Image: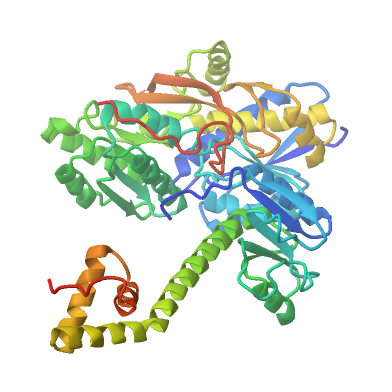
Amino acid sequence: MNDALKIGILFSTTGPYGSMGRDARDGADFAMAEYAGVEGLAIEPVFFDPHADLAAYLDGARHLLRAGCRHIVGTITSAARKEVIPLVEKHDSLLWYMCPYEGFEANENVIYVGGCPNQHLLPLFEHLIPRYGARPYLVGANYVWGWEMNRLARELITNAGGEVLGERYLPLEETAVERIVAEIAQRRPSFILNNLIGPSSYAFLEAIKALGNRDPAFRAENCPVVSCDLMECELDDIAAGAAAGQLCAASYFDSIATPENAAFKARVTERHGAERRVSSVFASAYTAVRLCVDAIVAAGDDEPDAVRRELYNRSWPTLFGALSIDRETNHAALPFHLGRINADNGFDVVASRPPLAADPYLTGRNRQALPRLRVVS
Amino acid sequence: MRETPNFTGWQATVLHREDGNTEKLIRQLRLLGIHATLQWAPLSAAALPDLVIVDADQGWDDLLPWNGETPACPVVALLGSEAPGRIAWALGQGAGAIIAKPIATSAVYPALVMAVSIHQERKATAEKLQYLEERVRLRPLVHAAVEKLQAARGIDEESAYAILRNCAMRRRLPMEQIAAFILAGAEPLPEAG
């Protein structure tokens, strides 16, 4: 390849999920920096920041494609991904999406490196129901992620013979959580599924902490707040100690004890300092860029079809362990980890599962579609 | 929607000439757990799949075995044309959803969910309608049975009707059927209460 290989990076570094966007961008940037010293490989990242304006994602994708990028790593919300996909399809390029999402999508022009519900929500409930019971309260951001995660949660709970004690939504960036917390205090659920994002989520965790101080039944060890999208880079935005003890599902935590992660963190420390914790979005963006570039190099071409073929044909050494992409769904098989927030604003891993193949439409291609979870306690 | 729709193990027949669209469609069906076969010949009424996806741009009237009648399984139309005649043809075949051509893979799952749901709704409505038609048809029997009860017991119409209705409720049978028994003399006249 004589010309520089251009890779588009599309993240919003401001707005309700700005801290995730900034970390994602840093992760992508870090991967790019690692390639900088590789002889014979010239990569030119092209960044675009839509500043959380949905319409600007389309402009951004157009800008990146016109600049000669055939591969775009990015978007965090499903709304932004859906905005970009038609253009990516039209230009026969590839979108590398790296966030956990609500599933029910498998596009040929998207490589999914984040997880779908059978990789996060299902194992999460399999862990929670026997330990805490099947009477959760569901909260979510008022858009498709919150709606669909809670719909699935309700189905899992119904199948388990449990009962959803409440389901409430907040607009993005809404921090008035008092009414929801009052209802939770009154209904006394066995756990709380939190699909809020950004400032809403932080305010909610702080209010639940205050509730737990008044009533021990709502302390994290008795009635945990569990999330599928909370990460290290957000914990500093939450009042000190407010989220300690709460749970989160992810495919990566900074604290995961593998030689690959130790080596990775040592390299991150060199660049960002020892204080910097690696979040799952940093790790996923990094991994998406690495996969993308390595597959292009292996294919000897950035033509999407050649890259896809190369991608399917082997398993790739990554931060998540050996990672494979399913040729039917274009989704990565991902490990499941459950983290408990510690007093030090990190996650202690309390449960893990080896990589689970993605089942975006919950067809039960790998296991029973929606398991009938058993309540033990 | 409470239950996540699941098509795993379904058989689908795609009635379309093989092209890039069908390739994309069948790939998407496969990842939904559906086994799809492609043919461009009339569908046999003897071996019906769980689901039919039909080319409404080129389709002709004998392609589907239920020409104009209620479809025996859910139907999705593939449509590139905007011509009212082709849309009418799709409707005439009982299509419950349309997937526009060229096919966007994201259109497939929603169309299947919608077509299956509409098919079930239509079936339930048709069954209900048939049941109600039967009852309307047999209404004169009820009337005649009420008259017979009135005459036999020397009671007014309202009381006779109440006896008949209570009897039907007790035996968990439609009133029309009880009325038929009574008129046929197949059983003794029911008592009040």
Query: Where is residue B77 shown, x and y percent of the image?
Result: 68, 65
Please indicate whether residue B142 sits to the left or right of residue A267 in the image.
Answer: left
Query: Is the residue A72 above or below the residue A142 in the image?
Result: above
Count numbered badges in the picture. 0
Q: Residue at x 78, y 56 (%)?
A: B21
Quadrant location of the C terminus of chain A? top left
Query: Where is residue B153 shown, x and y percent of the image?
Result: 14, 83
Q: Residue at x 44, y 79 (%)?
A: B133
Quarter of the image for residue B92 reads bottom right
Quadrant location of the N terminus of chain A? top right
Query: What is the basis of the colouring in this image?
Result: rainbow
Please indicate whether residue A60 sits to the left or right of residue A237 in the image.
Answer: right
Which residue is the extreme one toward the top?
Answer: A259
Observer-nearest residue: A25 or B19?
A: B19
- Residue A42 appears anywhere in the view: no
Quarter of the image for residue A46 reads top right
Observer-nearest residue: A263 or B110?
A: B110
Please indicate whether residue A28 sits to the left or right of residue A347 in the image.
Answer: right
Query: Where is residue A146 shown, x and y percent of the image?
Result: 41, 48
- Residue A114 appears anywhere in the view: yes
Quarter of the image for residue B144 reads bottom left
Query: Where is residue B137 shown, x and y percent of the image?
Result: 42, 83
Please indicate whether residue A244 sits to the left or right of residue A262 in the image.
Answer: left
